[in-house]
Image (spheres, rainbow, N blue to C red):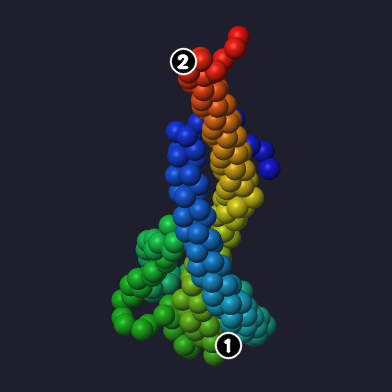
Amino acid sequence: MAQLNVNPTRMELTRLKKSLSVAMRGHKLLKDKRDELMRQFLDIVRENKVLRERVEERLKAANQSFAVAGSVLQREVINSALMLPKQEVFLEVSNKNIMSVDIPVFKTNTRALSEGDMFSYGYAYTGGDLDAAISELSGVLPDMLRLAECEKAAALLASEIEKTRRRVNALEYVMIPNYEDTIRYITMKLDEAERSNTTRLMKIKDMMVEERISEQRVRDGYDTD
């Protein structure tokens, strides 16, 4: 790993150790976030699979009923029957936060002239297949909205998981190793400098001791030079 371009001083060593500690804490928090995002993502994907199968099955039934109704009734009759709906559906969009990701939440409010009346036509000139198709479409709406929530949530969570994964990898394989290598390098340089200072001080001490011994010998008359 590459070392950081810093001066090998004790101040830099202290600063790098603090930075390494922060990076390791951040790495753990990001890993925990990534794992929780993955758990939430997998739960949503499983729910999305079940919802999609159910929605496709109900839409298929509704289309079959429409097809049967179209084979029995004239197109003009069906268009006239569906021209003026009795119900209005209003969509409310809000958000909920999952691990710092804003997920959309859809809610519908239905307004009708009479409670539970979804049919905008009389029963005299239409058949039961058209009623079945309208009922299927009305019943599948909540599942379709929840499916839209799940698919959008899965896309947003997948994007956040990828961002978090890149950050975790950058810390794990680049920043933390660089900090560790630089700390080892500075520690080695400081140890070398300390050993050099110790050796130099020992030499100076030996020289001073020899000088004092020589002076003492001169004073005592042992030095013949």
What kind of residue is marked 1?
Answer: Asp
Residue of label 1: 129
Q: Residue furthest top?
A: 225
Q: Could you tell me which quadrant the C terminus lies in? A: top right
- What residue is rendered at 40% in x and 61% in y? 97
Q: Tell me whether circle 2 and circle 1 mark residues in contact (CB < 8 Å).
A: no
Where's residue 84, x and y in %?
43, 70
Nearer the observer, 163 or 88: 163
Disc 2 or 1, which lies upstream in sequence?
1
Q: Is residue 92 above or below residue 63?
A: above
Kind of residue indicated by mark 2: Arg
Say left or right for 18 vs 195: left
Front label number (2 vs 1)? 2
Q: Which residue is mark 2?
A: 219
Q: Residues within 10 Å of mark 2 (few under 14, many from 20)?
A: few
Asked whether 224 or 89 is in front, the reply is: 224
The x, y position of residue 171, in whole percent, is 57, 49
| SS label for mark 1 | helix
Confirm whether residue 59 shows in the render: no
Residue at the image position 47 percent from the left and 59 percent from the top = 29
Spatial CA span between label 2 and label 1: 130 Å
Q: Is residue 172 left or right of residue 205?
A: right
Label 1 packing within 10 angstroms: few (<14), some (14-19), many (20+): some
Residue 169, how many percent across, how many down? 62, 52
Label 2, secondary structure: give it.
helix
Question: Considering depth in this image, is 197 or 117 the residue closer to the camera?
Answer: 197
Q: Is the residue 112 above or below the residue 3 in the image?
A: below
